[in-house]
């Protein structure tokens, strides 16, 4: 069997770390993990030299500028990492005939829908982060059409910082927490997304599936508000803290969030036969793993 070479960027982030955790089971694959200290993806000369020095069959791009609120006052950096660098990755991967799987976000939508968003629905980001990620999608599709873009949402993991870990910490420190209940979506355990990405490559390489390019949606199954999510995180972890539902207007943050950002996952299920676990089961698995 061919030794498929994979490069994972953003390897120290939530998703990159989950792919690393999976990589022992990736027989037949030679996986290289890098992050910004190995290669700054905004540095054109360094990126070109890196790809000249090594050859890869796939790049999984987990690198991103993910500070959603900070991006409002630092849109320039968000665009450098989430747009220009993704365009550059598209250029170099196309040059070396390398396929790329890139991760994008539900924040490309404005949240005005009342049924799950499909890949064909109109995009209209309402934040600087969302605009930068959308530009990244556009540049990648233009520069390397041999690409798969997976939009995900509400990502959390045992690795890195995220809503689940923040709720656990604050829940232990405080008697009550106020959490918005008018923003609705689906959480995503990064381990499930990591498995979906690896599955796509494994199925393609085994000849089970074609590499069907384009945009896909992946989150966990089910629909909840941040309030419900917080409630169940603390309940499952056995942390005693009252969760109070509040409206977004009572909890102002710099970046506006889509009120409804549920993603329709039919396409990735149909084309790649990807398993999509229910959010509660995945949350339970993650919390069990933390213990
Ligand atoms: N987190 C979410 O809730 C969420 C929701 C929807 C979609 N997504 C998308 O899912 C993907 C994975 O997210 P994540 O939560 O795993 O991200 P993350 O934990 O923030 O990891 C991103 C990684 O990229 C690195 N990075 C930043 N700038 C870089 C550069 N110039 N060159 C190379 N690497 C760089 C970061 O390093 P530093 O930490 O040193 O900056 C970090 O290690 C991203 O595309 C993100 O936009 C995330």
Image (spheres, rainbow, N blue to C red):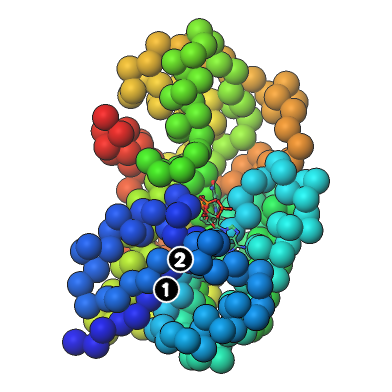
User: In which quadrant of this rendering is ligand 1 seen?
Assistant: bottom right
Residue 156 is left or right of residue 285, and the answer is right
Q: Circle 2 sits in a helix, a strand or a loop, which is it?
A: loop
Q: Is residue 190 above or below residue 4?
A: above
Residue, disc 2: 34
**Could you tell me residue 120's position as x and y percent?**
61, 67
Label 1 packing within 10 angstroms: few (<14), some (14-19), many (20+): many
**Could you tell me residue 156's position as x and y percent?**
45, 43
Label 2 packing within 10 angstroms: few (<14), some (14-19), many (20+): some
Residue drawn at 73 percent across, 62 percent down = 79
Q: In this view, does 42 lie above or below 123?
A: below
Q: Does the residue labelled 2 lie within 8 Å of ligand 1?
A: yes
Marks 2 & 1, CB-CB < 8 Å contact: yes
Of 282 and 171, nearer the camera is 171
Residue drawn at 33 percent across, 72 percent down = 31
Residue drawn at 69 percent across, 28 percent down = 248
Q: Circle 1 sits in a helix, a strand or a loop, which is it?
A: strand
Residue, disc 1: 7
Could you give the CA–CA distance between mark 2 and mark 1, rounded to whole angstroms?
8 Å
Residue 264 shows in this picture: no
Of 100 and 257, nearer the camera is 100
């Amino acid at each position: 069997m061919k030794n498929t070479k994979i490069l994972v960027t953003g390897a120290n982030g939530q998703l990159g770390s989950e792919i690393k955790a999976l990589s022992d089971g990736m027989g037949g694959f030679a996986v290289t993990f890098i992050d910004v200290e190995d290669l700054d993806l905004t540095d054109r000369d360094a990126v070109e030299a890196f790809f000249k020095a090594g050859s890869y069959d796939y790049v999984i791009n987990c690198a991103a500028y993910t500070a959603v609120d900070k991006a409002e006052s630092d849109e320039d950096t968000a665009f450098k990492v989430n747009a220009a660098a993704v365009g550059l990755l598209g250029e170099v991967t196309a040059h070396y005939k390398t396929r790329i799987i890139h991760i994008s976000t539900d924040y490309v939508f404005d949240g005005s829908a009342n049924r799950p968003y499909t890949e064909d629905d109109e995009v209209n980001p309402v934040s600087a982060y969302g605009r930068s990620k959308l530009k990244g999608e556009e540049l990648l599709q233009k520069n390397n059409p041999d690409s798969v873009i997976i939009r995900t949402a509400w990502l959390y993991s045992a690795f890195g910082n995220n809503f689940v870990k923040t709720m656990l910490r604050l829940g232990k420190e405080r008697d009550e927490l106020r959490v918005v209940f008018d923003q609705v979506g689906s959480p995503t355990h990064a381990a499930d997304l990591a498995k979906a990405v690896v599955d796509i490559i494994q199925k393609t390489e085994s000849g089970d599936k074609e590499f069907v390019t384009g945009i896909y949606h992946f989150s966990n199954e089910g629909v909840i508000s941040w309030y419900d999510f917080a409630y169940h995180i603390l309940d499952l972890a056995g942390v005693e803290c009252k969760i109070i539902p509040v409206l977004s207007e009572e909890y102002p943050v710099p970046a506006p969030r889509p009120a409804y950002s549920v993603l329709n996952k039919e396409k990735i299920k149909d084309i790649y036969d990807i398993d999509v676990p229910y959010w509660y089961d995945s949350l339970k698995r993650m919390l069990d793993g933390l213990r």
